[in-house]
Amino acid sequence: MGKAVWSDKKRFIWILSVLLLTAFIFTSGISYKVAHDSLSEQISENTLPLTSDNIYSEIQQDLLQPIFISSLMAQDTFVRDWTINDEEDPQQLIRYLKEIQNKYDTVTSFFVSEKSRKYYHSTGVLKKIEDTDPNDAWYFRVRSLPTSESYEVNIDLDTANRSRTVVYVNYKVHDFEGNFIGVTGVGLAVERVQKLIKLYQKRYNRRVYFVDTEGHVTLHGEQYSGSQTLQSSPGLEKYATRILTSPSASFSYVRDNKTVYLNSRMVSDFKWYLMVEQEEAEGEKKILNTFWVNIVLGLLVIVVILVIANLTLGRYQRKLEVMASTDKLTGATNRQMFEEYFSQSLQNAESSAVPVSVILLDIDYFKSVNDNFGHSIGDLVIKTVANIIRHQLRSEDIVCRWGGEEFLLLLPNIDLSHAADMAERIRESIAERKISVNEHEIGITVSSGVAQYKLGEPRADLINRVDVALYQAKDRGRDQVVLSH
């Protein structure tokens, strides 16, 4: 026993000596890494998102005004009445367009009638829209927009001045009965928008540009020297799908051997992504490095010696617990851990007479996603569905990855009716989400079965009832919720 203790003591002294020696040898390297990581976190999680928020606020004032103006024009009673009354006295509309242009300082304002196909401009009737003219393709594209979309933003040559490029807001116009009668809108000169971007870049010392939902760079400053698409941008191409499938994202990548921090944010009204980039600042890194050298290094060795065992064991223990209790792909609870939660909830229901409900959810036509787009996109679909589900649940609810594309939701203290409402909200949220992959949009739907635990019911019977309800939802056409009473 004594020898074993002595041996353990010698081992401890040896390990401690190695730790001390290693700490002093690698002091400079550790200090550099700590400073670098801290600076990266500060930029990516605080400084850059704050800058992006400030620029987004200014965009709402500077760039979203044309959308508001176009919306007013599309809803204007005068425009609709004038169009319905066979477009009598074109000068009335021309004067109206000229007033809009002067009042809001736009470079153009226009209206195209569906009936006559005349292009009315603030300077007069410019032309008639022809379906065979490539320059008029924008009109038919706007006309065919889904009913859920009222406008589009695009960059094109000015119809009245082909030497000028304009950022157009094209807005559909409907009569009082909802029938499509034309397209109206205004435009901003690209040069004016570029000046705004230049102002943002100068004010915040960041690179600012916009991309559309397909990844094409739509607007940028004069000094922009990057690629025209995210998919072809060196270092950034592997993050293109992540950017275009998320409302916001923050990460870093390497460009020209420099670390670049990027924050992306969807400007929903403009239907473009705002991209704000910042290169790693050497001066800031040196200042921060000096700070950590003076503050951290004095404490680092002592802290490492005192907490290394506890910290390491605790970290690995937590890691093992996470690995043992969660699904690796989605982060959802795995079946083994779910069984414990399930048993506990049913016991509580028996003892306290509180309701417990479950939802069994399955992704529709998931095999076709894997077959058509590959398993990596299939994994992305599963993770997307898991994230949407989590956002709809309460803190006490449990989501389990029950099978390949199946999820089982445990809802304590929720009866069948409220569980059905939650299942419907989840279904709607998933159906509204689109995933863009290589210029294709993947629509996701799910089928769900819902059941409430009956006191004294075997657990297997509850699972069987909700499973039957799920397959009834599948048999009835999918993308729906079926209850098991």
Image (cartoon, rainbow, N blue to C red):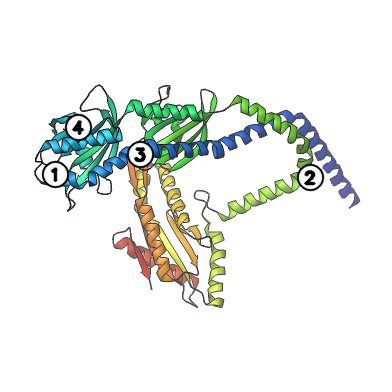
- Measured from the top left, where is residue 46 in percent x and y? 56, 39
| Mark number, residue 64 | 3
Of tags 1 and 3, the one toward the viewer is: 1
Residue behind mark 1: 82
Of tags 2 and 3, the one toward the viewer is: 3
Residue behind mark 2: 306
Dot 2 or dot 3, earlier in sequence: 3
- Measured from the top left, where is residue 481 in percent x and y? 35, 63
Q: In this view, does 357 lie above or below 143?
A: below
Please state if 305 lies on the left or on the right of 46 as rendered.
right
Q: Please, what is the three-letter code of the amino acid marked with disc 4?
A: Ser
Dot 2 or dot 4, earlier in sequence: 4
- Measured from the top left, where is residue 62 in percent x and y? 38, 35
Q: In this view, does 451 lie above or below 369?
A: below
Of tags 4 and 3, the one toward the viewer is: 4
**Residue 228 visible here:** no
**Residue nearer the viewer, 481 or 193:** 193
Of tags 2 and 1, the one toward the viewer is: 1
Q: Residue at x 43, y 21 (%)?
A: 223
Q: Please, what is the three-letter code of the amino acid marked with disc 2?
A: Leu
Which residue in the rendered view is the most extreme toward the right? Answer: 2
Q: Are marks 4 and 3 in contact (CB under 8 Å)?
A: no
| Mark number, residue 285 | none
Density class for disc 3 (Cα within 10 Å; few <14, some 14-19, many ≥20) is some
Please state if 275 lies on the left or on the right of 341 as rendered.
left
**Residue nearer the viewer, 182 or 308:** 182
Residue behind mark 4: 122
Label 2: state its secondary structure: helix
